[in-house]
Image (cartoon, rainbow, N blue to C red):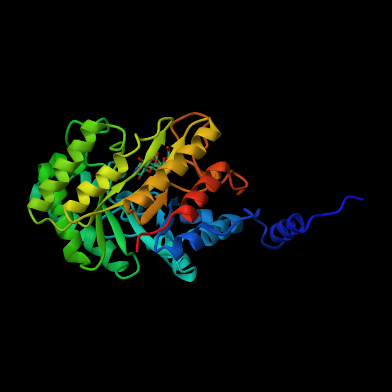
Amino acid sequence: MKAVTPIIALLATAEATCGIPSTGTTKLREEAGKKGILIGSGAINPTYLDDPRFAAVLAEQFNSLSPENELKWSFIHPTEGSFTWETIDRLVDFAEAHGMMVKGHGLISSCCNPDYLLSITDPTAFRAAMAAHFEAVMHRYEGRVDRWDVVTEALKTQGGGLQANDFYNVLGPSYVEEAFRIARAAVPDAKLFISDNLVESLPGKRQDLYDLVSGLVANSVPIDGVALQMHITEVPPTPGVITDMVNAYRELGLEVAISEMDVHTLNTTLQADIYGAVISEALSAGITDITFWGFTDKHAYTWLPGAKPLLFDENYRAKAAFYATHTALTDFVRAP
Ligand code: G3I
């Protein structure tokens, strides 16, 4: 009979005990925690917590979470004055029970706005609806959600200025500024972010975002940071671009976070390399808040047929992308 090595025996025991495959490494949150870094999973639909293995890996590996769609307007506030609090309550309770932070995602998004809002065409009434929505949602989670994506995807997908979303159509470009002012007044202690995609790969859009944000800062709009979504498809950002963005926004007094990272490709080696390179550069540049758009391919959102963009496979086994991320975290030495 073959001898079972102690390490294999140990891994098998871990699997049998908690029902999830062992990674054979320390936890991501353990490594991140030592260095003061938030390592999170976004795209958490609270119903996924019904799966004990999903809940176990989430709580074990991450020290932050954010919802997928459930905080977007039509989900949490489908008809005027009526809220579906139980979904987000469940997520926040879960986070607190496991020592995790919560990021609010979806106050203003390019999708998911209810008919009652869309029927308002008078700017004053629309503004009042926006303030009522922000106040209700942000007050409910005051002190429990530490940071918010206030405006998501203000810019046209390929760049070229603000996109004409439901807010722009009624309030014009000032809706961005108004959203931040309402949010700060509602919860003065939470960090407020503007979140956008593709800026790491499209120079023109990168400049658009900088112009927008520097204009907000010049107008004393209360904004704390820029959230780079970092949805990558096949091609990694050019080395140095993330660092340049962090430095540019730091000069404006703002922080930069990664808020929705995933890597869409059929090439798992390339995927791991991209995860490793991006996380490594982000940490060296001074980013301390990194969130992925989910963590298991079981619940992945992708536009590339067949792509499995996340760190764990559908059965919660760590992929090469996980190990590349883990190595980037362990290798990182934070400047004193
Ligand atoms: O809830 C309806 C359901 O009633 C209906 O039957 C069904 C039919 O298609 O649609 C359901 O809504 C879907 C919703 O997700 C909830 O499942 C929408 O069609 C679908 O478009 C929506 O997709 C979400 C997408 O944002 C909307 O733009 C994704 O789940 C979500 O992961 C994605 O997340 C965005 C971030 O918020 C912002 N950044 C980009 C990111 C996508 O990578």
**In the image shown, does 224 or 49 lie closer to the viewer?**
224
- Residue at screen point 40% across, 60% down: 37
Q: At 38% across and 59% down in the image, what residue appears? A: 334
User: Which residue corresponds to the image point at 28% horizontal and 37% vertical from the top-left?
Assistant: 199
**Image label count:** 0
Compared with 308, 193 (above or below) is below
Front one among 310 and 249: 249
Q: Residue at x 54, y 34 (%)?
A: 269
Question: Which image quarter has ligand 1?
Answer: top left
Is 41 displayed left or right of 26 in the figure?
A: left
* Residue 171 rendering spot, x and y as whole percentages: 11, 45
Residue that extends furthest to the front in the rendered view of this protein: 336
Residue closer to the observer: 210 or 151: 210
Q: With 51 as the anchor, is 5 left or right in this view?
A: right
Res. 283 in view: yes
Q: For this rendering, which residue is in front, 279 or 193?
A: 279
Q: Quadrant of the C terminus?
A: bottom left
Say whether residue 311 is visible.
no
Q: Position of residue 102 (x, y in %)?
A: 38, 62
Residue 15 placement (x, y as % from top left): 70, 57
Image quarter of residue 192: bottom left
Residue 308 is situated, as x and y percent measured from the top left of the image, at 52, 37
Picture quadrant where residue 235 is located: top left
